[in-house]
Amino acid sequence: MDKQTECKKPVRGTREWAVAEINCCLGCPHGCRYCYARRAAVVKQGRVTPEEWPVCRVIPAEVTKDQPRYPGQVMFPTAHDIVPENLTACLQVLKNLTAAGNRVLVVSKPHLDCIRVLCAEMSSVKDQLLFRFTITARDESLLALWEPHAPCYAERKACLEYATSCSFATSVSVEPMLDTADVVAMVYDLLPFVSHSIWLGKMNRIEERVTVESEAMERAVKRLADGQSDHHILRIYNELRDIDKVRWKESIKAVVGLELPSEPGLDR
């Protein structure tokens, strides 16, 4: 091993998937309780108030600007989602990125109407796109609690099926796993419609990002934290480790002893 390789730091977070993060909006209507982007914009940066965050604000300069060609896969979006309110803007950013020759990882808690438009409009460059749909649980009560305004499980799965039927490359992010008791069964439910990978990860920084405003929420946080204990993570890993398409985010790699990547954007 040469000195350059030895000095490389482990890659974490979104850098496991992409060399760059692209966004064109501020705010998101999905209301996910664990959202790192909301905390960054509201608490750390003071760009918007908590009441303003659910309104998706398009940033025109990010939509119209020419995109460079990046040295690896880029991720879009990372700090908001693709929703009906910003679909036109997001579509333009995708066209700008692909026109520059980029490979784009399109990450979303997907709305079927939006995915139908994206598949139609981006069909000529489908070889440059990889959809990654965030599907965190099948239990609608958990989705309603943690992701109250995001699409239901059936709609997200329908998006996966639709993109696959249109011959786009497809993958799934189960990060965070909201229901570790059911996650293995859910993986098997989704696998037939996945061409690339299914990524599993824990909820990170719960105390920092999740506001506990009631006893019910306190119980929900405890249930989730208990469910992602090392015991449960090892059980899930042992049940799914032999499936080639199943991959593990850093939060799980740290528990099961897998090496972290040393280069960004490898997506494996």
Image: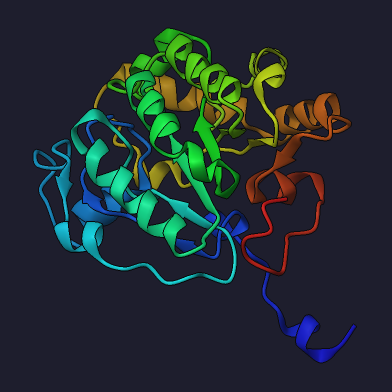
Q: Residue at x 53, y 37 (%)?
A: 131
Residue 203 place in picture, x, y as percent: 51, 38
Q: How many numbered marks have been drawn onto this rendered protein structure?
A: 0
Q: Is residue 91 above or below residue 219?
A: below
Residue 81 place in picture, x, y as percent: 33, 39
Residue 208 place in picture, x, y as percent: 37, 48
Q: In this view, does 68 lie above or below 52?
A: below
For the N terminus, the quadrant is bottom right
Left or right: 252 as drawn, with respect to 45: right
Q: Nearer the viewer, residue 248 or 34?
A: 248
The single residue placed furthest to the front in the displayed view is: 124
Residue 27 place in picture, x, y as percent: 21, 44
Q: Which residue is drawn at 73% across and 40% down?
A: 247
Q: Which residue is drawn at 45% across and 31% down?
A: 119
One can see residue 140 in this view: yes
Q: Is residue 164 above or below residue 14?
A: above
The single residue placed furthest to the bottom in the displayed view is: 3
Left or right: 219 as drawn, with respect to 51: right
Left or right: 75 as drawn, with respect to 196: left
Look at the image and name its color scheme. Answer: rainbow
Asked where in the image residue 126 lies, by quadrant, the reply is top right
Q: Which residue is drawn at 59% across and 65% down?
A: 72
One can see residue 44 in this view: no
Asked where in the image residue 221 lies, by quadrant, the reply is top left
Left or right: 184 as drawn, with respect to 130: right
Q: Nearer the viewer, residue 224 or 23?
A: 23
